[in-house]
């Protein structure tokens, strides 16, 4: 991380390019990206949770200024008065040529916020909803977000329907989200998969670790969500921070959130980051985490902390 004249790290000068790049199909992105779920309010799905619109727009514009060129979104990221897709469109259109917008389908929310799950035939409508809201004629990346109720079951019918929308030119690249290794293999047998978006971070289970490894072996991006929030999931980073994370953070003049992001990026060159925030200071910090390099000893200590050590 660059240092200022007093020898302190200066995150303001760090851009997302410091994290290195990865290719999603033919699209090159910086590994450190942005998740838009937190732009609509502290909890995207809570009734009455509403963000300051100008602040959210400023965060998006600043992210792009800082070199972020991979933004994760969904049409179901909305609170009472804010929609992530609307904010992205208003803040960033006309979009920079190198900006990759990744969205996800299968879950949906009706106008009052109630969840529903699309049939294979209904996926086209969800893709078109994203196209309308984002103001695009095709989507760069669409993840098939598998509902919990599917468990280890087949995703072939839904993924096949999405593959047809790719053939029709509505989608450039396909991904899968919330999957097990067998479901990733099933999807790959139907059409090319460029990314896997699963929950992952310091607290990840062996099963989650297996998906990260399987993605790397296949040369596919692994895109973790909840890398900062961890077990707090939708609630955010609410749990008391692990002392080892605090110690490593202190050693670098960094924050625990930065250490969590740096550790995650250290899991492999195919691992990306899409930290979510509506806070401009957190955005700057998160981008700067792409330049934070942990020593082998620090990584080993953090690995030890995972197993309760
Ligand atoms: N495929 C899926 O099913 C799925 C599920 C969940 C999320 N996602 C995507 O993944 C992205 C990341 O997930 P996420 O946003 O839930 O979790 P996250 O990035 O792990 O953490 C976000 C939480 O941490 C806080 N935070 C962010 N940066 C921070 C920092 N530097 N210091 C302290 N606190 C910080 C945020 O609050 P502030 O706003 O106050 O900073 C928010 O509460 C989402 O935005 C979304 O695009 C996908």
Image (tube, grey):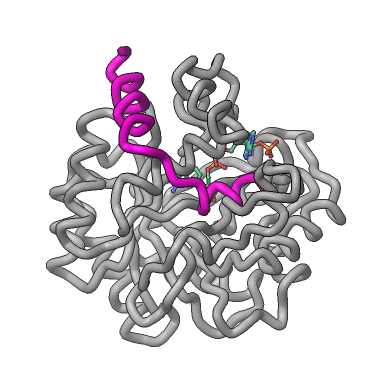
Q: Nearer the viewer, residue 91 or 85?
A: 91
Q: Quadrant of residue 20?
A: bottom left
Q: Main secondary structure of the magenta part?
A: helix
Where residue 197 appears, x then y in whole percent?
Answer: 37, 51
Q: Is residue 75 visible?
A: yes
Taking the image as shown, residue 5 lies to the left or right of residue 252, namely: right
* Above or below: residue 157 compared with residue 231: below
Residue under the point 13% across and 49% down: 182
Residue under the point 58% across and 26% down: 250
* Above or below: residue 66 compared with residue 25: above
Where residue 38 appears, x then y in whole percent?
Answer: 65, 44
Where residue 214 appears, x then y in whole percent?
Answer: 17, 51
**Ligand 1 shows up in which quadrant of the image?**
top right
Taking the image as shown, residue 156 lies to the left or right of residue 54, namely: left
Residue under the point 39% across and 35% down: 201
Is residue 275 one of those drawn in magenta?
no
Is residue 297 one of those drawn in magenta?
yes
Q: Quadrant of the C terminus?
A: top left
Numbered range of the magenta stretch: 284-309
Q: Nearer the viewer, residue 267 or 188?
A: 267
Q: Is residue 112 visible?
A: no
Residue under the point 43% across and 49% down: 117
Where residue 77 appears, x then y in whole percent?
Answer: 61, 50
Q: Nearer the viewer, residue 63 or 118?
A: 63
Q: Nearer the viewer, residue 22 or 49?
A: 22
């Amino acid at each position: 991380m660059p240092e200022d004249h007093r020898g302190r790290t200066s995150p303001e000068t760090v851009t997302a390019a410091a994290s290195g790049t990865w290719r999603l199909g033919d699209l090159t992105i910086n590994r450190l990206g942005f998740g838009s779920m937190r732009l609509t309010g502290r909890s995207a799905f809570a009734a009455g949770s509403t963000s300051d619109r100008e602040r959210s727009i400023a965060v998006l514009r600043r992210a792009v200024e800082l070199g972020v060129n991979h933004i994760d979104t969904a049409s179901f990221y909305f609170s009472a008065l804010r929609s992530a897709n609307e904010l992205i469109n208003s803040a960033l259109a006309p979009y920079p040529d190198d900006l990759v917008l990744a969205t996800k389908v299968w879950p949906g929310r009706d106008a009052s916020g109630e969840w529903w799950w699309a049939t294979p035939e209904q996926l086209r409508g969800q893709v078109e909803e994203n196209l309308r809201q984002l103001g695009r004629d095709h989507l760069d990346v669409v993840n098939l977000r598998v509902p919990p109720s599917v468990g280890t079951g087949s995703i072939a019918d839904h993924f096949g329907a999405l593959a047809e929308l790719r053939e029709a030119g509505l989608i450039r690249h396909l991904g899968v989200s919330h999957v097990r290794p067998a479901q990733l293999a099933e999807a790959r047998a139907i059409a090319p998969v460029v990314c896997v978006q699963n929950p992952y971070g310091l607290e990840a289970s062996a099963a989650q670790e297996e998906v990260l490894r399987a993605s790397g072996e296949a040369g596919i991006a692994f895109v973790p969500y909840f890398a900062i929030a961890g077990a707090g999931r939708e609630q955010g980073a609410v749990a008391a921070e692990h002392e080892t994370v605090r110690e490593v953070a202190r050693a670098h003049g960094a924050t625990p959130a930065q250490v969590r992001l740096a550790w995650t990026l250290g899991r492999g060159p195919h691992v990306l980051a899409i930290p979510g925030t509506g806070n401009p200071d957190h955005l700057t910090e998160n981008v700067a985490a792409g330049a934070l390099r942990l020593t082998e000893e620090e990584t080993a200590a953090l690995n030890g902390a995972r197993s309760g050590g």
